[in-house]
Image (tube, helix red, strand yellow):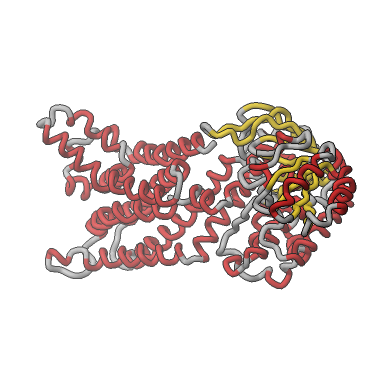
Amino acid sequence: MRIDFRQVATIASKEFWDRIRNRWVLVTAIVFAAFGLAIAYFGAAQQGGVGFMGIEVTIASLVSLVIYLVPLIALILGFDAIVGERERGSLDLLLSMPITRFELLLGKFAGLSAALAFSTLAGFGLTGILLSSQQIDLSGLYHYFVFVLSALLMGMAFLSIAVLTSVLASDRARASGAAIGVWFFFVLVYDLVLLGILVGTGGAIGAKAFPFLLLLNPADVFRILNVFSSEQARTFYGLATVFPQTLSNLWFLSLIMVLWIAAPLGLAAWRFK
Amino acid sequence: MIEVRQVVKRFGDILAVDGIDLSVRKGEIFGLIGHNGAGKSTLFKMMLGLESPTSGEILVDGQPPRGEAFRQVRRALGYLPENVVFYDNLTGLETLWFFADLKRANRATCPDLLAKVGLGDASRRLVRGYSKGMRQRLGFAQALLGQPKILFLDEPTNGLDPEGIREFYRILEELRAQGVTMILTSHILAEIQGRVERLAIMKMGKICAMGSLQSLREQTALPLRFRISCPDDSAEPLRLMLGQVGGAIVYEGSRGMLIVECPRMLKMEVLRVLASATKEVTDIQIEEPTLEDVFLGYGIERDQASKPNSGLSEGRQ
């Protein structure tokens, strides 16, 4: 069936303006900016210093924060996309319009992505502008750029999972529970389990498969993306030793992230019949 | 305009729609009557392509309700869902704009539509503050977007006050004059009976009667019921007297109460018998059942006690 992008745009623009009106975008941007600045200036407080400690260290600290924050925000943003309409009773009316289910799904995702993109770019963009008043070389700026973009991609991947959740769940309460579960699994549990397997088997099973297993978690892909975009961070993490060069290509990792966006959405479209 | 053939819809063990045939002609107002849960809304959803039938065939404006071809049909459909719900964070006008965009209707028509349904003054207020009746009106305005050829109205007068109901049917008449085909549901026959050309009565997923109001009346030969109060000792003699009227069914309701059921044409004959029994009869009440009583079994407690006396036993529980 043909996709009518005007219908997608109508749904997307409603979703986007809803988030502008209810100040979701503003609040999220402020949260991002506040955390970004706080980390840039106080991130090294544990080492006894306050003030800007260099872009690479700042990015490394931001990565460990954002990896918790962005998936949570994206999941909360998207979990009721479809189930909310269903529970409200407006889904039937929407679907009686000249719009296909796929267009509705795509429009929801696009609009919510735009809201997420807006607040991510505004929040971390502001931080970036303030950082650039410090002495930062071009490669530092490039790494920051990669960081912001990869944070957005990770957000969209979790948004895509959230939309899938909202299609599968029978009511909002379940959808929100599932969304929190997804966050718990990917952000907290997954790495621990992986580490457990690696240590438990003395590295026998894990070593070869380990890099590939990391790709099965968008949060880990985000981490790797940021590690490999910076020489300093790479040695800092020591990841280069376990990670084969072929898998650490920036484009390859970005492609994986895009797959993480497309796959849950595709699954959602298939189940939303 | 709308053809429904042998349509069945099953949800697990529940048979929501059980082999329905009906056709709605171009430009007519068709009523679908039934209890809540009789399957009206499910039938509606299938006609709109929101649910697919388990078996059977549906054609709306010559198209089955699916696929790219039906998208074109949808532009010319208006649908007012039962218990319509809108977005609390939008104003009435913004709500209408949103649906106008989806339907490719002109946004400029929205203020007029809102005025038409009586929401002109509230168009810039948030839907959050709307009453149930106002939401219903907004839903109706939404259904009218893009000058639809076919209107599906599910319980359209739900939540409207009498003034609103009159206004609603006035707009419907206007649309009928323009040749719009309309199908509407209700659980109150009395409300729509004078306003639809044909109606179908649905019960437990089946259509138990269909036709114009006049033809339904003729089909049913509605029975009358007399409630006769009498002193205890005269109940038996009175019963014998009434028993002589062929075709009347006589039985004892409660103490001191006889009940007679008979076809309408025996009315005078029964009355003559009763008039002659001045000593035995202390009071008479005559109940004239409506179509609603016959088909939907509302109101009177007849069905446990009495025997069916018309050819419409399938219309009852």
A182 is higher (above) or lower (below) than B246: below
Q: How many marks?
A: 0
Foreground pick, B169 / B253: B253
Question: Could you tell me residue A221's position as x and y percent?
Answer: 31, 42
Question: Could you tell me residue A239's position as x and y percent?
Answer: 19, 41
Residue located 31% across and 36% down the image: A216
Residue located 27% across and 38% down the image: A214
- Residue B173 horizontal side relative to residue A80, left or right: right
**Can residue B192 be spotted in the picture?**
no
Quarter location, residue A247? top left
- Residue A162 horizontal side relative to residue A43, left or right: right
A242 is higher (above) or lower (below) than B27: above
Foreground pick, A210 / A87: A87
What quarter of the picture does the C terminus of chain B occupy? top right
What quarter of the picture does the N terminus of chain B occupy? top right
Foreground pick, A113 / B5: B5
Foreground pick, B212 / B144: B212
- Residue A13 horizontal side relative to residue A181, left or right: right
* Residue furthest out toward the bottom: B121
Residue located 38% across and 67% down the image: A30
Question: Could you tell me residue A209's position as x and y percent?
Answer: 23, 29
Residue located 36% across and 36% down the image: A252
Question: Could you tell me residue A195's position as x and y percent?
Answer: 17, 39
- Residue B67 horizontal side relative to residue A253, left or right: right
